[in-house]
Image: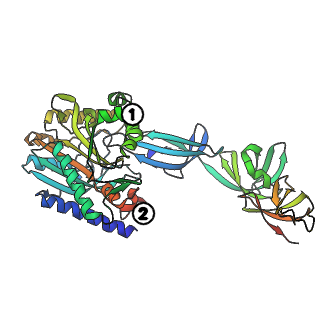
Amino acid sequence: MKMDALWLRANVIKAIRDFFWERGFLEVETPLLIPANAPEEYINPISTLPSWQLQTSPEICMKRLLCAGHQKLFQISHCWRSEERGSRHLSEFTMLEWYRAGCDYQVLMADCEELLQHIAAVCLTDRDCFVHNSTNINPFNPWQRISVQEAFLHFGQINVWDCLRNGLYEEILTSVIEPALAKFDSPVILMDYPVELAALARTKPGNHELAERFELYLGGLELANGFSELNDPKEQRKRFEDANRVRSKAGQVVLPLPEPFLETLSNMPASAGIAMGVDRLVMLTAGADSIDEIVAFTPEDL
Amino acid sequence: MYTVADLKKGLKIILDGDPYLVVAFDFVKPGKGQALYRTKMRNMINGSLLDRTYRSGESFEPASLEERSMEYLYKEGNHYTFMDQQTYEQVVMEEETLGDAKNYLLENLKVEVMLFGEKAIGISLPNFVNLRVTGTEQWAKGDTSGNDSKPATVETGYVLRVPPFIEEGELIVIDTRTGEYSTRVKG
């Protein structure tokens, strides 16, 4: 059983590579051990050397490559997030990220459609659907796009801003919204997040309360998170400092800022980038309900 | 103290003064949001189930539970007394706490007593116990009524269904997991 899962995993990774190589993306490798990640409220890096950290995402280095003039980049790499372990989480996991200069998040949504249709065509041999918790999700069905505000009002009869103010956002999202999204037989894109929930995303033109960020859901499983990148160094520094203030209040360590990234950020053209969980993509391809089923070893096996 | 990072199936913690066993656990974390730790827990005293969701930063007191081999001594009112044969230490349990286990308690029976601090909160019995039948109707030979079992009372006062051929004074084996007659002890 596990042997089949490992073949499937290898095929999914190969299909991802082929997809981006065929479209002229440059495959890059950036260091996994870095002096600073992008500080976020609820993501805890794993520290190794005194004051260095394992990457929680390759975004800082990949955006520096955009600043250096690269146009289309992708990377498949391991990321680490402290104390994240559950049926959909591993503390060490595999992430696919891709970036496009001169584009916004709408282009990434189109990429997602093509990528998942490609994976389905190449890796799903006996059926044409991804499967999660007994729901079939067909990537060739028309994709649904719903704004976060609409989703909260429609599925939860509640205002998302009220949820944020009252600390109910995560509870409503995971116990009401995600189960509602799990009923769709096509992938669903949840888009336009309150800016508080998008530390590195650009706000929508003419609306500074909403960020151009989206999440891709299949069968209620969160698969990818993409956005139009913020490239204003002053605003970015402020958001990092805000994140650190929230951390400090919650008794979490204050994280160092990625200074070289902030220094070069003004050279970044309008860009868009996205992170997709490779393990979860393999889960959907295998129809596995637990991440444990599709990795060679879980931490508990070691 | 445990933190939310220690939560997993099988963990025993104290909640509102009672020991709880974590019977189901999942970690959920929406993108960019706070982590939620969803648990289902069983109260180890009364068996009731509880759903609780925790967030980062919460902590729990470990429930220290100990299982000790003891012998059942006697019953007084609805209080049952057990004794540790090594230390001669005695614990008392109420009928309500024992539940169905009371049906099989015969003096000198060896059981495992679960202790939560000083307090005994339950016992585990051997899977099979031998008890003598103290009362049952006579089986009329050639009875064709089709009944393949009849009620019988054993020396603890427990009443169960036994095959028609079992007679008063016989020793029978009872499965304590189901409460049912298993076989008779010959001789």
Which quadrant does the N terminus of chain A fall into?
A: bottom left
Q: What is the CA distance from the residue labelled 1 to the residue labelled 2?
A: 39 Å
Residue drawn at (22%, 51%) of the image: A113
Residue A216 can be seen in this image: yes
Q: Secondary structure at mark 1?
A: helix
Where A4 sits versus A81, above or below? below
| Residue A269 percent across, percent down from the top left | 8, 42
Amino acid under label 1? Gly
Q: Is residue A68 left or right of residue B99?
A: left
Q: Secondary structure at mark 2?
A: helix
Relative to the observer, which residue lies in front, A236 or A274? A274
Q: Residue A78 occupies which quadrant of the picture?
A: bottom left
| Residue A208 percent across, percent down from the top left | 20, 29
| Residue B150 percent across, percent down from the top left | 85, 59
What is the chain letter for disc 1? A
Relative to the observer, which residue lies in front, A235 or B165? B165
Q: Is residue B83 left or right of residue A173?
A: right
* Number of the front mark, 1 or 2: 1
What label sits on residue A156 in the rendered view? 1
Amino acid under label 2? Asp
What is the chain letter for disc 2? A
Are marks 1 and 2 in one subunit? Answer: yes
- Few, some or many residues within 10 Å of mark 2 (<14, 14–19, 20+): few
Q: How many marks?
A: 2
Relative to the observer, which residue lies in front, A51 or B17? B17
